[in-house]
Amino acid sequence: MTEINNKNFEQHFPEIRKALEQAKFVSVDLEFSALYPLKEYSPSLFDTPNERYQKIRKSVKLVVPIQVGLTAFSFNPDTNSYLGTIYNFYIIPASFPFIRKNCLFQSDTLSFLKFFEFDFNKFVYSGIPYMNKDEEQEIRQRFKSNDITDVQSLFRQELETIFHNEGEKIRNWYMTANIGETITIPEFYQVSKDSDEFVYFIHKTIRERFKGVWSSVENDEFVLKKVTIEESIKLNQVCNLEEECIKNLLGFSRVFRYLVSLQKPLVGHNLMQDLLLMLECFEKPLPSSYESFKKTINALFPKIFDTKTILYNIKKQVPEDKTISDKSLKDTFEYFKDGVGRHLALNSPAIENNCNGTYKYHEAGWDSFCAGYIFIRMAYFNLYQKYPKSKRYMSGELIAGLEFCQNKVNVIRGAVSSIQLDGEDPASTRPPYLVVESLKNAPINIHQVSSVLSSFGFVEIRKFPYQNKMALIAVDNFGSARRILQNFKSNKEYQIRQYSALKHSPVIRACLLSGVTISGVILLWITHSIIKK
């Protein structure tokens, strides 16, 4: 695994481009500063796809990715083997006048990352900048109109101080130096080395104050060279200061844009939040329309595979004595890597990586490899069930075999199990809603019912509007729903039944009593209205 930071990014960028270009597919993983920073936008089992999108869209405006993992998987048909070339990027939002970004860090997210030994110093001190297209356009426009001056700099006072301290030294050299002579100013580099903004304003100030002086950074030193005015103009055309600044501020976004240009299949595990965050931070602010989001992300990445969705679809094909562990990415990876899942299919390909034996779960680079690894194993197992057992499969065949899961992205605890990025979302496969009704002559106690039902798994409860003795229950799996119904058959305090709009909606019951005909569409609309109240 290669760790990429702001100090070695330019050195490794050509290698990264080549690895992505040669890849059959690329897997991705992100670590965030927060998951659900705003309580009012927390996910719910009652969320429709549009509602979940709107919640995440509002949340990610306050969240930043702090680490990105990319694994480029190449395939060798002669040896029937894959090689995952892993890159682990520490990234940080670009900081420059007019594009300062506010973000939230969630304490439990930080505690989680700290537990898994995330290096926050590398994020802060060595993070690669990034910005989206709107931010880039803002900077370009400001440069064009000459709006960016040291007045807007965070380091205005520091710039004044360092030029006050070093200015006389530079002036004395400037007055006596011949064309072609140079001088190094170590203090400039020591002060500015960790800030693209500081570096930009040092260059800008030197070139404005001393006509015929060219400034550059060479071997970790600020070097000033006396040149002719004509040479200065030519150098600025070749090495334009503003373009160089934009290039540095784009940072990781250059990797993202190159990945988009290649149109390679993109693989990840529980990808929905990763996709929204990548679009917001590296491409453009998320559109307000859910359908516009789907069109945008599908144009950027026409083939997306969520390993969580694939897992749900192939689990039923696995023998009972070899049941897949799907509690986490780590469990699923270890099931396929060292557990019984490794031999679900004969002649499955070897999968290697460039990790050299050192890795940590919940490090984006390693997690991106794990996602790609289980993708290959599941893709192979999927075809193994349908064709001769001795057959070997090319990479394209494995990917084509999973077309039924293409662009289906898992939804964690929502009203639907997945969304379809290139078409209409699939119908819900979640358990039907349940209704709990108090058998006593008293309003239902939501907290008490929640406490009682918590032993059956993850459930959510919402009161019916205008019905203080009834509440709606959403359950995340059919097993929990069955156990709840069975255990409350003879309960003396509460009656729990499957929800029916015809039976439980007071509006529909009133319509039926008055002889009004109700269509299926109206039934769905009324049910949704009840859920949202």
Image: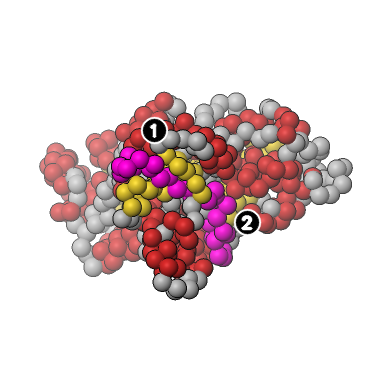
Tell me the tag on residue 406: 2
| Residue 331 visible in the current orientation | yes
Q: Are marks 1 and 2 in contact (CB under 8 Å)?
A: no
In percent of width and height, residue 422 lies at 56, 64
| Residue 368 visible in the current orientation | no
Q: Residues within 10 Å of mark 2 (few under 14, many from 20)?
A: many
Name the side, left or right, on which 93 lies relative to 312. Answer: left
Query: Could you say whether the residue bearing mark 2 is in a helix, strand or loop?
Result: loop
Q: Is residue 428 magenta?
A: yes
Name the side, left or right, on which 382 lies relative to 504. Answer: right
On the image, numbered disc 1 is attached to which residue? Answer: 451
- Which of the pair 13/369 is nearer the observer? 369
Q: Residue at x 48, y 71 (%)?
A: 518
Can you tell which quarter of the image residue 239 is in?
bottom left
Q: Residue at x 78, y 41 (%)?
A: 80
Can you tell which quarter of the image residue 337 is in?
top right
Q: Earlier in the sequence, mark 1 or mark 2?
A: 2
Magenta residues, as a range? 417-445
